[in-house]
Image: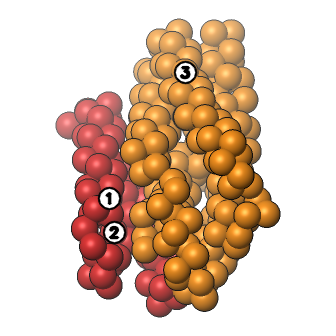
Chain colours: A orange, B red
Amino acid sequence: MSTSAETAGVSRRLPGDLAMWFFILAELSVFALLILAFTVAQALHPQMFSEGRQLLDRSTGLAMTLSLLTAGLFAALAQEQVRQDRPRRAALLLCGALLLACGYVAIKLTEYAHLLANGLGMEHDTFFTLYWILTAFHFLHVLLGMVILAWLAEGCLRRRYGAQEHSGLESGVLYWHMVDLVWVLLFPVVYILD
Amino acid sequence: MSASRVLIACWMALAVLSSGTVALGQIAASGLVSIAILAVAVTKAWLIADGFMELRHAPRLWRWLVLSWAVVLAIAISFAL
């Protein structure tokens, strides 16, 4: 189901399914609460959070940011290809997005392994408790996003999507952009903001 | 400008702003630096919403709901810190 509205003579269209947009709003609200909880805890324990943040590698955070955003670009370009009825090209771009997402997963797992090896697990202190909850929750969303990207790529190869029918693909791609949207606020809060 | 070029331009801006966030983080922490970092984050969120999610072409209510999510969250963070 697509929605559209005529506003001041200009055709305005909401991409994807309306249900996906309500889902995205719900997800954004949950992440906003988690990010705010992290920030309030930081205000209560500024020294602990500053010391905890020193143990995180910002360049790793930047690499993860670029992986996610570039995967988002590939997914958006794939959507454009489907609209032009080029599902095979779209499938290639979606596979590229999936590879970039794998890069994010590899970097994140390396970071997790490094922290665990240094005894910085969930019980270490409040900073790391919230770090693990927040980043692991986002990580799970990335994994689900990867399943969706793979499903969309398969759908493109089977010509399930095309110039006339692409609402489902738009909804899947929107989910990935939501994951990116959350990360661009989560990244500075967790890695940068002292 | 074609849709693909708009997307690539958005991505380039996002990459530059992401590097800018890390560069700002190298400066000694202060209220002004924190506000600058949050402003960059909001700009990135808007680029994703308007560029990648195509909310610039969407009904205004939906566009403003998503754009204001980033602004309200950034303001709440700046008050909390």
Disc 2 designates what residue?
A: B37
Q: Chain of mark 1?
A: B
* Tag 3: amino acid: Leu
Determine which quarter of the picture holds residue A34.
bottom right
Picture disc at residue A99: 3
Percent position (x, y) of residue A73? 42, 34
- Secondary structure at numbered mark 1: helix
Decide if residue B21 is on the left or right side of residue A24: left
Which comes sooner in the sequence, label 2 or label 1? 1
Mark 3 nearby-residue class (10 Å; few <14, some 14–19, many ≥20): some
- Residue A76 against residue A12 in the figure, above or below: above
- Identify the residue at horizontal 53%, vertical 82% (top origin): A46
Q: Residues within 10 Å of mark 2 (few under 14, many from 20)?
A: many
**Nearest the eye: A118 or A108:** A118
Residue name at image x 68 percent, y 15 percent: A154
Quadrant where the C terminus of chain A is found in the figure: bottom left
Whether residue A6 is situated above or below residue A176 in the rendered picture: below
For mark 3, name the chain: A
Q: Residue furthest left?
A: B1
Residue behind mark 1? B21
Q: Dot 3: what SS?
A: helix
Quarter residue A42 falls in: bottom right
In the rendering, at what x and y percent does residue A144 appear?
73, 38
Helix, strand or loop at label 2? It is helix
Give x and y (percent) for residue B72: 49, 80
Q: Along the line of sight, which residue is nearer the eye, A75 or A102?
A: A102
- Marks 1 and 3 in Cβ contact (< 8 Å): no
Q: Are marks 2 and 1 in contact (CB under 8 Å)?
A: yes
Distance from label 1 to label 3 (Cα)? 25 Å
